[in-house]
Image (cartoon, helix red, strand yellow):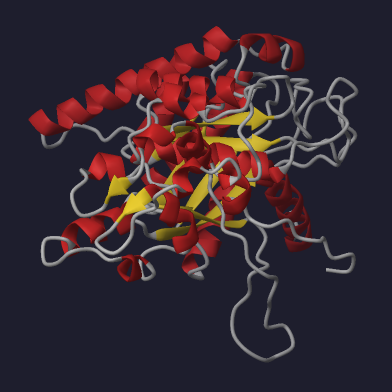
């Protein structure tokens, strides 16, 4: 194939891969050095950024093997009934692209997903072949994340973990009813069954590595999944409950949330308007509360409104604190870490800094200005050596006082 043909397909299939949120990307302004000034570019097709457990930022080539698909999931832009341009790479072409990008120091790894062509097992074989060629024939030691297909032969799904650092299976939607209505070709039991087998294989490989030094490595970075938000009628409380179940049952590294978009080529059965991106953001915040702040799923669900939705104007931790004011104020000079993690406006690093500082001296209100973005949010919920909220915590208008002020949208921003 000519270079221009490869580049055309790269542009198309890299753009199609952006709907998969299982590889976290960071946003930035568009810049390049085509005018001869400066060095580098933020506009390279298919480049995304993921983050390792130790906080390192990893640049990945993110693309689909193909956007052809025999499935007709209503929320997916690449469904068979969608009128979009189609393209396809061979496994060797993906290998060549990955090595070319890697040798130019553009990337440190590969994130590869695909639409379903011919059959689930055939597509899974193609994905595995890419990873096998990279590892076996080129001794590629960069990061590989493979999106696996639960409907494929279980042995093929298991093989993916032998070549990839991380594997992921999209659970798609938070409810079985939503999945059967919007993704008729998929089955919730099949998806969770495949996730369970992967989880078991990861655990077995980890145990084997502890006993036998030369035991094969299997998906050392674990597995993740993604849920589509807003395509069905599931509430945030249901989504939080589903995410918690997945974490507990399959020891997932991450659950990603992706707000569906009706544009382009919307299915007639989907809502006409996409959910606000702030809803996706609030779900990520609730996810962090469970993973890093010690909140039980039921407590996060208690932060929702009467309709089961998280408030959009305030974050979930503040919403919970306003409902359970009897847990406050928290004395930062004596409270345990668990209690301080529930204070709105205090992050994990800030709490650890307070714990370290109070071993040397008493914490004062001015000390918090260096640890928190908004001391105003902290005031009603804390006690320091020189501050006590008195009746501030009992004010009926406390939510209005703490919510970010409304901003006028700019017409020509």
The residue located at (26%, 53%) in the rendering is 332
Could you tell me if residue 66 is visible in this image? yes
Whole-percent x and y of residue 145? Answer: 47, 42
Q: What residue lies at 20% left-to-right and 54% top-to-bottom?
A: 333
Residue name at image x 33 percent, y 44 percent: 341
The spot of residue 247 in percent (x, y) is 40, 25
Going by the picture, which residue comes out furthest to the front?
A: 391
Q: Which of 203 and 139 is in front in this view?
A: 203
- Residue at 53% in and 16% down: 191
Closest to the observer, 409 or 50: 409
**Left or right, residue 399 beside residue 128:** right
Looking at the image, residue 121 lies above or below residue 341 = above
Question: How far across and down, in percent of the image, does residue 100 sit?
Answer: 54, 63
Vertically, is 379 above or below 410?
above
370 left or right, relative to 50: left
- 42 above or below 200? below
Q: Is residue 235 or residue 251 the one in the foreground?
A: 235
Q: Is residue 198 left or right of residue 284?
A: left
Up-down relation of residue 119 to residue 8 (above or below): above
- Quadrant where the C terminus lies? bottom right
Instruction: Give the quadrant of residue 16.
Output: top right
Residue 410, image x and y in percent? 84, 65
């Amino acid at each position: 194939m000519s270079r221009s043909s490869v580049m055309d397909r790269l542009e198309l299939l890299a753009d199609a891969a952006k709907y998969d949120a299982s590889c976290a990307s960071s946003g930035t302004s568009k810049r390049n050095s085509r005018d001869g000034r400066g060095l580098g570019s933020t506009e390279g097709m298919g480049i995304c950024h993921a983050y390792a457990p130790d906080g390192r930022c990893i640049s990945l080539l993110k693309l689909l093997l193909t956007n052809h698909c025999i499935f007709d999931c209503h929320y997916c832009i690449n469904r068979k009934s969608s009128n979009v341009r189609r393209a396809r790479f061979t496994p060797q072409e993906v290998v060549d692209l990955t090595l070319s990008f890697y040798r130019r120091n553009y990337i440190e790894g590969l994130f590869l997903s695909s639409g379903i062509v011919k059959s689930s097992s055939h597509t899974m074989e193609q994905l595995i072949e890419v990873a096998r060629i990279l590892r076996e024939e080129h001794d590629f030691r960069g990061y590989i994340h493979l999106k696996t297909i639960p409907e494929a032969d279980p042995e093929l799904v298991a093989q993916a973990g032998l070549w990839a650092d991380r594997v992921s299976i999209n659970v798609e939607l938070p409810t079985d009813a939503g999945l059967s209505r919007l993704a008729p070709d998929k089955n919730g039991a099949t998806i969770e069954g495949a996730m369970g087998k992967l989880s078991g294989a990861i655990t077995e490989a980890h145990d084997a590595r502890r006993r036998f030094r030369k035991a094969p490595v299997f998906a050392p970075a674990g597995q993740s999944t993604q849920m589509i938000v807003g395509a069905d009628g599931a509430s945030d409380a249901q989504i939080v409950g589903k995410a918690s179940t997945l974490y507990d049952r399959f020891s997932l590294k991450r659950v990603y949330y992706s707000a569906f978009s009706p544009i382009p080529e919307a299915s007639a059965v989907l809502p006409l308007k996409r959910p606000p991106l702030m809803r996706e953001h609030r779900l990520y915040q609730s996810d962090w509360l469970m993973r890093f702040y010690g909140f039980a799923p039921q407590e996060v669900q208690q932060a929702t409104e009467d309709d089961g939705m998280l408030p959009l104007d305030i974050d979930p931790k503040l919403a919970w604190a306003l409902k359970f004011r009897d847990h406050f104020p928290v004395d930062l000079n004596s409270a345990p870490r668990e209690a301080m993690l529930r204070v709105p406006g205090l992050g994990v690093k800030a709490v650890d800094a307070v714990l370290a500082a109070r071993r040397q001296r008493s914490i004062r209100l001015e000390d918090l200005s260096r640890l928190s973005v908004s001391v105003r949010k902290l005031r009603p919920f804390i006690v320091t050596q020189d501050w006590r909220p008195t009746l501030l915590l009992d004010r009926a208008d406390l939510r209005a006082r703490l919510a970010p002020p409304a901003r006028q949208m700019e017409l020509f921003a």
